[in-house]
Amino acid sequence: MAGALRFLHDTAWFFALCGAPAGTPPEPSLHPDDPPLNIRAYLYLTITSLFWGGNSVAGKLAVGHVSPMALTTFRWTIALLLVLAFMAPQVRRDWPVIRRHWLQLLLYGVFGFTAFNALLYTALGYTSAINAVIEQAGIPMLIFVFNFLLFRIQASFAQILGFTVTLVGVLVTAAHGEFSALAELQFNFGDLLMLLACIVYAGYTVSLRWKPELHWQSFIAAPVVGALVSAVPLLLWELSRGATIFPDATGWAIVVYAGIFPSLLSQVLYVFGVEMIGANRAGLFINAIPVFGTLLSVFLIGETLHPFHIVALLLVLGGIAVAEWGRPKKA
């Protein structure tokens, strides 16, 4: 835990990764087609997908050690404690802007940080993990649709093709290389919840276009408060059903991981990536999450590595490459 705190506190290291001096936001003047900016965005979004893929492994490990809504609430508690410990000075400097946009920032936390995971956890009580993975892969297409409806931003043919290739990669992962297994899937109330979850996260991604001008620390800090506030009623609901499992030692390790990496660092890097190259391009990296999750399951919890895992990873990465090669001049 102490090592993780030192890691988060070392903002000089973090911004060496970002390519900007400590204490400054990403350089806004770079054009979305600027190669250094693209490379940084790809790095941020790949790390984001890796951490979120690790979150799926943490979710598997959490069963019997901490219940879903307890995990959701405690992970945002950890994130808020880190925000208070390391970001409070910047939040105070930006307080006038935060106060003007407080509702928008809190809603980013409610929908972008908490609602998706709450819907996902609930959906998995009704539908299979395979269904959830496949349905989550529709988020990039929803981002394309929302961007077109709201801003008339058109996806290029190459972006649609790239999305299709990444979707095939997700299907290969979900079907364990046997596409005939997909024909046996059944759909129910949980799948409707997953569709709603996907709409929520696609909407959150597109809405980042309207985010107020804030230092990245302040922009993350305020939604974390919204995430925790919205998670508490879910924990109370779980308690009322007698379904809460408070963390044991393994559960707390999972909570700490989820609070630092998927909840905090991934959100920072995802916002950077969307800001740098646009929602249409950044959204495709979401389809790398199930592939990374599967590979991490192999390396961390001993699941067997199969050839279809490698094929799926190559398809997802290849689809992203195709989409980037044929992207519109203005993302």
Image (cartoon, rainbow, N blue to C red):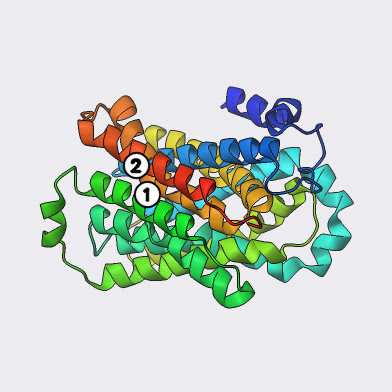
Q: In the rendered image of this protein, does residue 8 appear above or below residue 207?
A: above
Closer to the camera in the image, 114 or 315: 315
> Front-most of 171 and 78?
171
Q: Residue at image x 33%, y 27%?
A: 300
**Percent of width and height locating residue 256:** 51, 37
Location of residue 331 by image quarter:
bottom right
Image coords of residue 245 (percent x, y)? 35, 49
**Residue 13: horizontal and vertical position, in percent?**
71, 25
The answer to whether 270 is drawn above or below residue 229 in the figure is above
Q: Amino acid at mark 2?
A: Leu
What is the total number of numbered labels drawn onto the structure image?
A: 2
Residue found farthest to the bottom: 149
Is residue 232 shown to the viewer in this render? no
Mark 1 or mark 2: which comes first in sequence? 1
Tags 1 and 2 in contact by the CB under 8 Å rule? yes
Q: Secondary structure at mark 1?
A: helix
In the image, what residue type sits under mark 1? Thr
Q: Relative to residue 285, is residue 22 drawn left or right?
A: right
Q: Tell me the quarter of the image containing the N terminus.
A: top right
Q: Looking at the picture, does residue 193 appear above or below residue 268? A: below
Q: Which residue is mark 1?
A: 166
Q: Residue at x 61, y 76 (%)?
A: 150
Q: CA distance from mark 1 to mark 2?
A: 6 Å
Say which quarter of the image contains residue 240. Answer: bottom left
Residue 261 shows up from this direction: yes
Query: Mark 2 — residue?
Result: 315
Q: Residue at x 22, y 36 (%)?
A: 308
Residue at screen point 76% across, 27% down: 12
Tell me if residue 8 comes above or below residue 110 in the rendering. above
Q: Position of residue 320 (x, y in %)?
A: 46, 45
